[in-house]
Amino acid sequence: MTELAAVKAALKTQAIETPSWAYGNSGTRFKVFAQAGVPRNPWEKLDDAGKVHEFTGVAPTVALHIPWDKVEDYAALAKHAEQRGVKLGAINSNTFQDDDYKLGSICHPDAAIRRKAVDHLLECVDIMDATGSRDLKLWFADGTNYPGQDDIRERQDRLAEGLAEVYERLGDDQRMLLEYKFFEPAFYTTDVPDWGTAYAHCLKLGPKAQVVVDTGHHAPGTNIEFIVATLLREGKLGAFDFNSRFYADDDLMVGAADPFQLFRIMYEVVRGGGFTPEVAFMLDQCHNIEAKIPAIIRSVMNVQEATAKALLVDREALAVAQRGGDVLEANAVLMDAYNTDVRPLLREVREEMGLDPEPMKAYRRSGWASKIVDERVGGEQAGWGA
């Protein structure tokens, strides 16, 4: 197999999970902007996700968020997904919207509220059993806003205790993915603020616990690709939440703010052996002012482009330059790959997969946008309030 053929073959195996919540209404702290045609329930979210996969060919699964996507019959929801050409993916918990969680959830000083939070996480594992999902994704808004508000060490003890109970409930083929975020909504201490804290808890829990890298959850200037390389080296990188940030957790389209960073991250994924199903590529974005489905299609394409460039890096030439201490040549090898226009290559890949080479144009021609505006009248649109 030629080098180019190998790159094409790898790109055809890529799978990017889209988030159910990205199809619903979202906004800033000040306003949620409603859009015509937005899904009113999880079933319609899957309808839209099916269209993203239909036109991209690499978005075969959809992450659910509980209770936003709670239904009575998850087997029926899974069947509906399959009828739309997709499957249900990671189950995301929600321990940040109830009034009870004002001072935290799994780390709360009140044992009764901690019990409520852990019971919700256990419910999510039950849902995983019903949907056939492999991954339980956990993000906690827990933390404190003022010095002395709570005991920092005790909160870590509570976190470890709750995670351990949920970990023991996991099935043999299920995983816990622990996400971190360096601030917000807690501004003094955050209970899982960085990859090191997440890694420490996952290491203690065992092999079924992995770290999630959300590309928007870092301080400005953080070298995310170093984190990726380290977690891959330790066998603890479980998934990505892809999005973009200019300031903080902006949740913009992946590759929109810094496509070079996305390329650097994807190179470390490829170089470190992370381009496998064991590392889940997920989107975690909110499309506040742009049309939902086209934005998700564009995001998928952005990840594809960064991946294609990463696969094109001449790793042998790079290694020679690195071993020889040739700083400029090593950098030039990376930049040659990054500056390659991979859009013609990806058009070829899509044609070979039986897809339209231009997903955005194909979606616009499909008439789906006008169809959902006409049909989704009445009811309550999916989304979350600011």
Image (cartoon, rainbow, N blue to C red):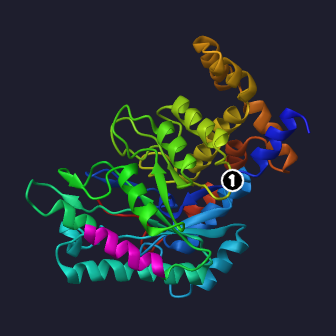
Q: Name the residue under label 1.
A: 276
- Location of the C terminus (image quadrant): bottom left
Left or right: 100, with 315 as reference point: left
In this view of the protein, which residue sits in the foreground, 333 or 92?
Answer: 333
Across the whole image, how many numbered discs are drawn on residues? 1
- Please report the bounds of the magenta region as a residue range: 157-168
In this view of the protein, which residue sits in the foreground, 62 or 326?
Answer: 326
In this view of the protein, which residue sits in the foreground, 157 or 194?
Answer: 157
- Location of the N terminus (image quadrant): top right
Residue 65 location in percent, x, y?
46, 69
Residue sitting at 46 percent across and 39 percent down? 224
Residue sitting at 41 percent across and 76 percent down? 67
* Residue 33 position (above or below residue 330): below
Residue sitting at 59 percent across and 63 percent down? 372
Residue 7 location in percent, x, y?
79, 38
Q: Main secondary structure of the magenta part?
A: helix
